[in-house]
Image (spheres, helix red, strand yellow):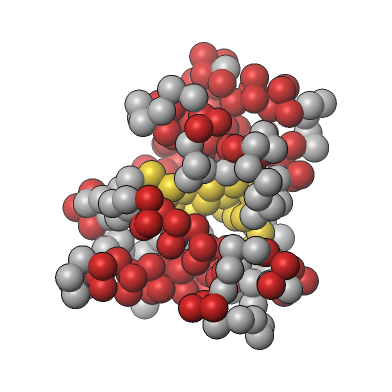
Amino acid sequence: MPYRTTPLVIGEFYHIFNRGVAHMPIFKSKQYFKRFKKSMVYYQVDGLKPRFSLFSPTLHLLDWNKKIVEIVCYCLMPNHFHFLLKQVKDGGVSEFLRKLSNSYTKYFNTRERNRNGPILQGEFKAVLIESNEQLVHLSRYIHLNPLVSGIVEDLETYTWSSFPEYMGLNGENICSKEIIIDQFSSLNDYQDFTLDQEACGRELEFIKHKILES
């Protein structure tokens, strides 16, 4: 296994991302998105839990005291995904991504008429978040993906991102969103902050530079 240049440390936050091999779509329909989302909820918790085949999106079935990572925010795009994760258990980020990727790859290959081989472009990329300012701006960068890519005109309508959860629109409780939201006086303030693209341009370029460095 190749040496990871960015060590993954308990208590630290990381921008995690990966994309399809040769930029291929990894989410081809609503069913694919749903499966990945269900998997990421399931695999962030360690220990005994219902078999995945029996698992329901109702989150009370999982023991939230046994998280290996905290999902702060996420966005699933047609050919790639982003997470902002906090590592809770030693090796938690790697374990979470390994189980999530393996499970989803098996599902994808089965759906694609018994396709074989990887669907993701090698090992996931991880960028250490070095300041609280970078943490908050990264949440904006992740949430803006569907908008700046032209997939939607209203972020609140994009089901495969944590932004609707942040805005309290879907009743989900997947993310540890208080890490970000508690730094704003209201949800409207966070919404305004996210949509103020002009003000965040410089920070977004910094984040993209960090991605290229990784």
Residue at x 71% of width, y 23% of height? 188
Residue found 36% across the figure and 64% down from its top: 123
Q: Is residue 136 above or below residue 128?
A: above
- The total of numbered circles placed on residues is 0
**Residue 74 position in % (x across, y down):** 53, 47
Is 42 on the left or on the right of 75, as rendered? right
**Quadrant of res 20:** bottom left
Name the residue: 37% across, 56% down.
31
Q: On the rendered structure, is 165 left or right of 38?
A: right
Q: Nearer the viewer, residue 4 or 51?
A: 51
Q: Is residue 63 above or below residue 208?
A: below
**In x, y percent, where is residue 119?**
27, 63
State the residue lying farthest toward the bottom: 48
Q: Is residue 98 above or below residue 40?
A: below
Question: Where does residue 167 sit, x and y in percent of width and height?
Answer: 67, 34
Residue 102 is situated, as x and y percent measured from the top left of the image, at 38, 74
Tell me the residue at 72%/22% (across/down): 189
Q: Closest to the observer: 17 or 73?
A: 73
Residue 151 visible in the shown view = yes
Quadrant of image for the N terminus: bottom left
Determine if residue 10 is in view. Answer: no
Residue situated in front as seen by the camera: 104 or 2: 104
